[in-house]
Image (spheres, rainbow, N blue to C red):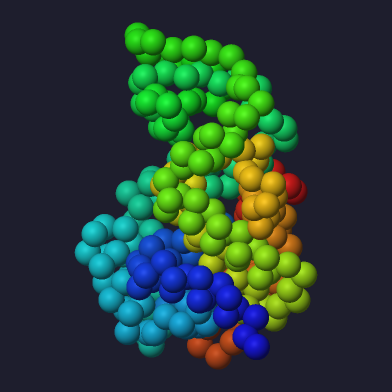
Amino acid sequence: MDPLLPLITNLNADGRPRVWSLVITVFGDLVQHRGGRVQTVRLNQLLGRVGIESGALRTALSRLSRDGWVEGRKTGRTSSYKLTPSGVQEFGPATARIYAPPRKGPVQTWCFSLADAPGALRVAGGWLHINGAVSSKGFEITGTLGKHSGTAIWDGLATEHKEALNRLALDLLALTNADLPLIDAAAARILLIHRWRRIVLRYPEVPAEFFPKDFPVQALHQQVAATYHRLTPQTETWLDTAAGEMPAMPSAKTAQANRFGLS
């Protein structure tokens, strides 16, 4: 059986893949630390491995160019793309959140407030913020949570949030102890980080201690980090590999090794 089939099936279960979004994930995860430019032939090989047709990729690149995210260049028969300066600027804050190290222990201090803020969890008619006050002028309480608060908070999560976390867990289970060829490892890393990126940028953080005991994967953030680093040697070797009209990527920057703080 295709070792990537569970991940590809999971991707398609979300609805028709947004190819332009996958391309952005590729730039952030595979391209920016490798000189910032990628050949279309490499994009075609990588995304073709997860079922994205070349026509869909061309359409996505055209859209990204039109929207000011990427700019293309053609040299002879070879075309390549890089992020525009404005595209690069968008990556900084998002990259820091996506590749942040997992927490090393339970959250010690919480603030319950009637004021919303980025990353807050909706609970009991208000908002729960990690690590202290939110500097609002309204009502707030700061302190620790009761023993059963985590269960109540989990039960109150939006259905789509819990479904996204569950699908991430299924991806991680499918990659457990998987020994993948180079292109498969690169494709698996992209699918993993694409799903993780969408969760991190769309939903508030759910600390590990709030997950139910029967959740498929415990310490989800830690498992994402560990699986990512396990896939990295084969992935980086694939980026080093030239084949036919596909040249090798430039050497990696050392910053890539520090993702998730596990180097």
Q: Is residue 22 above or below residue 84?
A: below
Which residue is pictured at 68% across the width and 52% down the height? 214
Q: Is residue 213 above or below residue 234?
A: above
In the rendered image, residue 142, in percent from the top left (x then y), is placed at: 53, 13
In this view, the residue in front, 50 or 205, is 205
In the rendered image, residue 217, in percent from the top left (x then y), is placed at: 68, 55
In the rendered image, residue 138, in percent from the top left (x then y), is placed at: 35, 10
Which residue is pictured at 66% across the width and 57% down the height? 216
Left or right of 85: which side holds 128?
right
Left or right of 140: which side holds 20?
left
In the rendered image, residue 144, in percent from the top left (x then y), is placed at: 62, 18
In this view, the residue in front, 86 or 121, is 121
In this view, the residue in front, 185 or 7, is 7
Left or right of 78: which side holds 96?
right
Q: Is residue 231 above or below residue 127?
A: below
Tell me if residue 215 can be seen: yes
Q: Residue lying farthest bottom?
A: 244
Which residue is pictured at 54% across the width and 34% down the height? 152
In this view, the residue in front, 84 or 124, is 124
Which residue is pictured at 44% across the width and 71% down the height? 13
Q: Residue lying farthest left?
A: 66
